[in-house]
Image: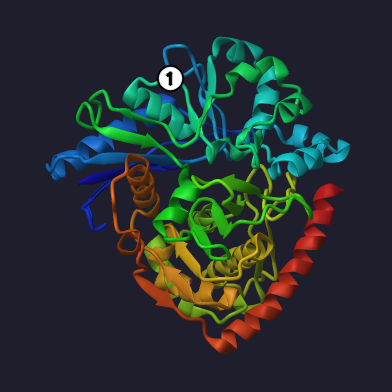
Amino acid sequence: MYVGIDVGTSTVKAAAFDSTGHELAVASRPVALALHGGFVEQDMEEVYGAVVAVLQEVTEHTPEPVELAGLTGQGDGVWLIDAEGRPVRPAASWMDGRAHELVDRWLADGTFETVFRRTGSAMFPGCPGPLLAWLDSHEPKALDAATAALYCKDMVFQRLTGAGPTTDVSDASMPFLDPRTRTYDNGVVELLGLTHRRGLLAPVSDPVATARTRGQGLPAGTRIANGPYDLPACALGAGVTSPGDGLLIVGTCLASLVATTDLDLTGEPAGLYINTDRPGHWLRAMPAMVGTAALDWVLSTTGVRHEEVDGLLAETPPGANGVRVLPYFAPSGERAPFVEPRLRAELTGVSLESTRADLVRATCEGIGYAARHCLQAAGLTGTLAVCGGGTRSPAWMRLLADVLGRPLRVVEGEVGARGAVLAAAERYGVTLDAEAWTRPTAVVEPDAGRAAYYTEGYEDHLARLAEARGRARA
């Protein structure tokens, strides 16, 4: 069997597959996020412990030999380790907002745009550049004690295998990697005032690093590959590899990805170009901060359970009886398809007559509009696959198809873990039928009338967003 490990932001999962891509077993463990004053951190020991636990569960339930394993996980953030591979401090998450003032300053003085023109990376507070610069100013002793600033999956790979610090071209894409040479741009490191911390950047393994496990969670000697990180892994797992085709991941992060062979560093700086395992092929990524976390907040605030969402979406018409939601709830603002660190969510059109159904539908519509904005900016011209936790709601998938005005190739199951296995198989020269592994479970067609309505609603969304961005800058 083949095992994929997906170290997510709120959930760690492991999935076992047979040679045809059929899921044999899935195990998951929640992991906590500590939120305080704009800081968003995670306990590395808790995360690694969850990885070992899900691997043990999967291998116990499916006692077949493990042919190989693929590892993926959340990107960005800063995961500082010492010479023994142990945490120096809690990991700073990609959701962290502490460095927003640095990003504001770099937006104002031109540093932000210069970095984008060099690397295709539009920095945001939770990416390694701003976070390392903030730590250098406020917690220099933590950086002094560290031997490497890794990404999440890299920390797990080192602990599972004992290999030295390493990352891959996908994780390293933001914000230091030159997408043409696939090596670190030392000029960008200097621009961010981090030349004296250059040694903390993990060596980039191209292609992805491989090693054998030491026996924690997986049998000792299991072949494992480190990467790519979750966004490109999901693209592989959904079969999105042809230029123009796209993927929408409806998860904690609402990520829009479009495969491309065109590196265009002009236009408004936003998102990033994710380097893939094929030189000259990128994923134009618009990983918005908005996502299922926005809906989760509305559900918890209104006392609605997740299993009630489909029924509530049917209770109120398109347009949610005038309720509108700009769903930018993240404490670090938004990062795609624009960067606005101070942008916050707005609810309008709410009255004493508004219902829970109105609020839920308006939030789902707002997330859909944000997705349309991201996909448009990423250059979607081909087919669109969709995956993530949001696919569990058929009503939301129908709403998304209507808002986006295009068919959705729904790919269910552990898509990131699936992509991690396909990447590992490619790295090890193991032949798997990628078409069978990535076949959609359903295709959701839009309703023509509702799609026309939402096309007008999208223009209204853009107008309200422009006003909100103006207020955020005031």
Task: From the viewer's side, name the closer residue of 96 and 382.
Answer: 382
Colour scheme in the image?
rainbow
Q: How many marks?
A: 1
Mark 1 closeness class: few <14, some 14–19, many ≥20 residues within 10 Å: some
Which structural element holds mark 1?
loop
Q: Residue furthest left?
A: 63
113 left or right, relative to 288: right
The part of the image, by quadrant, that contains residue 96 is top right
246 left or right, relative to 412: right
State the residue at coordinates (57%, 72%): 358
Q: Is residue 334 above or below residue 22?
A: above
225 left or right, relative to 173: left
Q: Residue 180: horizontal and vertical position, in percent?
A: 65, 42
Q: Amino acid at mark 1?
A: Gly
The part of the image, by quadrant, that contains residue 290 is bottom right
State the residue at coordinates (66%, 56%): 262
State the residue at coordinates (71%, 26%): 186
Task: From the viewer's side, name the closer residue of 376 and 298.
Answer: 376
Q: Residue 35: horizontal and vertical position, in percent?
A: 55, 35
The part of the image, by quadrant, that contains residue 14 is top left
Q: Is residue 253 above or below residue 370?
A: above
State the residue at coordinates (39%, 50%): 419
Q: Which residue is mark 1?
A: 164
174 left or right, relative to 115: left
Q: Residue 374: horizontal and vertical position, in percent?
A: 64, 61
Q: Residue 134: horizontal and vertical position, in percent?
A: 69, 25
